[in-house]
Amino acid sequence: MHWINVLVLTLMFLSGLQIFNAHPHLYWGNRSDPGKAIFSLDAREDQAGDLVGITRIGRHSFVTTGVLGVSDGSDGVPEARGFPSWLTVPGSTWLSMGRRWHFFFAWLFVLNGLCYCGYSLAGKHLQRDLWPTAAEWRGIGRSILDHVRFKHPHGDEALRYNILQKLAYLIVVFVFGVGIVLMGLAMSPRMDAVLNPLVAAVGGRQSARTIHFIIAWAFAAFVLIHLFEVLISGAFNQLRGMISGYYGVDAAPPAPPAAAPIAAEEQSHA
Amino acid sequence: MLDRRSLLRMVIGAAASTLTAACDRISDSSWAPKIFDRAEVLNRRVQGVLSPPGALAPEYREADISAVFRPNGTVMPSGAAYQSLLANGFRDYRLQVDGLVQRSAALSIGDLQGLDMRTQITRHDCVEGWSVIGKWQGTRLSAVLDHVGVASPARYVVFHCFDDMDPGTPYYESLDLAEARHPQTLLAYGLNDQPLPVPNGAPLRLRVGRQLGYKQAKYLKRIELLHSFAAIGDGNGGYWEDQGYEWYAGI
């Protein structure tokens, strides 16, 4: 299920950016009033007649020629396009095909997510491995400190998710996952006939589009952080664990005497 | 000198390009769009269950109306027939209604107003992603269908338009009878308490409450009731559908 997710999320993201490129502006509310965008990937011509890509966030704008706003089309000539062709499916500007990819893989995303939730509930993965315990909530401060010092758990502790991992995974599945699907549905004019209370609650259809976009990038950020964490915590061992289920455990380093009270506290988490 | 950062950027860039190139080959294949089309049928059916056929699109307040109702596509049909109607302020305009009907009709805007009048403030969502809100005055299409009498083999209403998208390729659209009879499906002649402006489709355009902008055909010339739209255009039920967009425009 994890690898289905890797493929589906990637294709959803890339085809989503193709769809975004058809109108590379975000708004808040129900309408997309001209001049009221809160985020834009624009293109304008400079005095020499060359295209300049401008990224606008609120009142701030940045020149982002080559990547955002203006980048090389499939023929190698710079053109006005929000995200560059190497970040969109299809690579060229082709909205109808991007929509087909997006709405096809959306089904796989939802079905895979439902299978994951069903499996996690039935196998008690959710209750046993993901739901934080009261003791973990109390230890969250130390976990954050360990994390920013890149101090990773050793021994048996490495076999369990720590509190930050648990929270990250719960938020990704239940806030990002559920949220992005609901915000996608909220953009559908047919679904809005029944979902209007939800659309109104988030501020309108254009707000739903903006939230959908933000969650998509939050997913991308999660994947990058997740990959980074897997790499620095022993990529080979982790990958072997994901594929074969076998996970090697190194011996916990002997605790220095000064750290003994903390080590004892850790024992109580088990 | 290759530093770690540019190496990483190269690796990510190469991986993304390889993936998007593979996806492009799939997009261009003959088999992939057919698989994607299965999902479109599923989308239509599932949304039809989740959002029942009679459910109404949200309607808004006067204060929600967009300052400018952004026109898209054709903003001035160039054909001689349209230009002469326009020159006369559309006084000679008649909407042809024919095909699988019991009584064909040629209806003026006044005739339509005599059949039914409805005002609604609804949102228009373009397939590109933007939205505008406008106040529409029009005649429910169901009243026109009742007026002409739909013959039993008819399944679709096809809308023929005055504007050519390419020379010899007029805009057209189609709805099934359920969507055509929906209470928010209007033949609109007024926008924001004014006669419908030319860029927005004067003298008469289609308004469908729960579908994307390309369904809302402008510059209506003729309405035809048919059992199948396979013989019109490239057979996909509309100008944009012939370019690869979904006939079911509910998403």
Image (spheres, coloured by chain):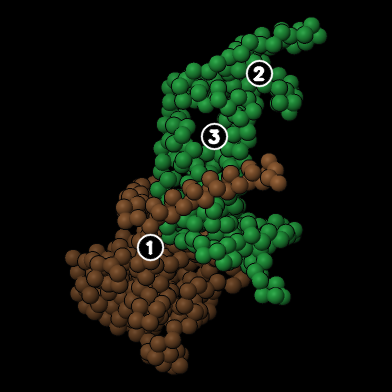
Q: Picture coordinates of residue A12 (x, y %)?
A: 48, 47
Q: Nearer the viewer, mark 3 or mark 1?
A: 1
Please say if B136 is above or below A13. below
Point 47% across, 56% down: residue: A90
- Is residue A258 positioned above or below B15 on the image? above
Q: Position of residue A130 (x, y in %)?
A: 56, 23
Which one is in front, A183 or A24? A24
Residue that numbered label 2 is attached to? A153
Report helix, strand or loop for mark 1: loop
**Residue B75 coordinates in the image, percent (x, y):** 49, 79
Q: Residue A2 placed where, x, y %? A: 47, 32
Q: What is the letter of the brown chain?
A: B
Vertical relation: A191 (above or below) A69: above
Seen at 30% across and 69% down, the residue is B234
Label 3 resides on the chain identified as: A
Q: Residues within 10 Å of mark 1 (few under 14, many from 20)?
A: some
Q: Seen in the image, is B170 located left or right of residue A220?
A: left
User: Farthest residue toward the front?
Assistant: B1
Q: Badges 2 and 1: C-beta atoms under 8 Å apart?
A: no
The answer to which of B78 and B10 lies nearer the viewer is B10
Q: Residue at x 41, y 92 (%)?
A: B84
What is the three-letter code of the residue carrying label 1?
Answer: Gly
Point out the tag, 3 or 2, that comes first from the N-terminus. Answer: 2
| CA–CA distance in space, label 3 to label 2 | 26 Å
Residue B244 circle label: 1
Q: Amino acid at mark 2?
A: Pro
Residue A174, numbered circle: 3
Position of residue B157 in the picture relative to residue A70 (left or right): left
Amino acid tagged 3: Phe
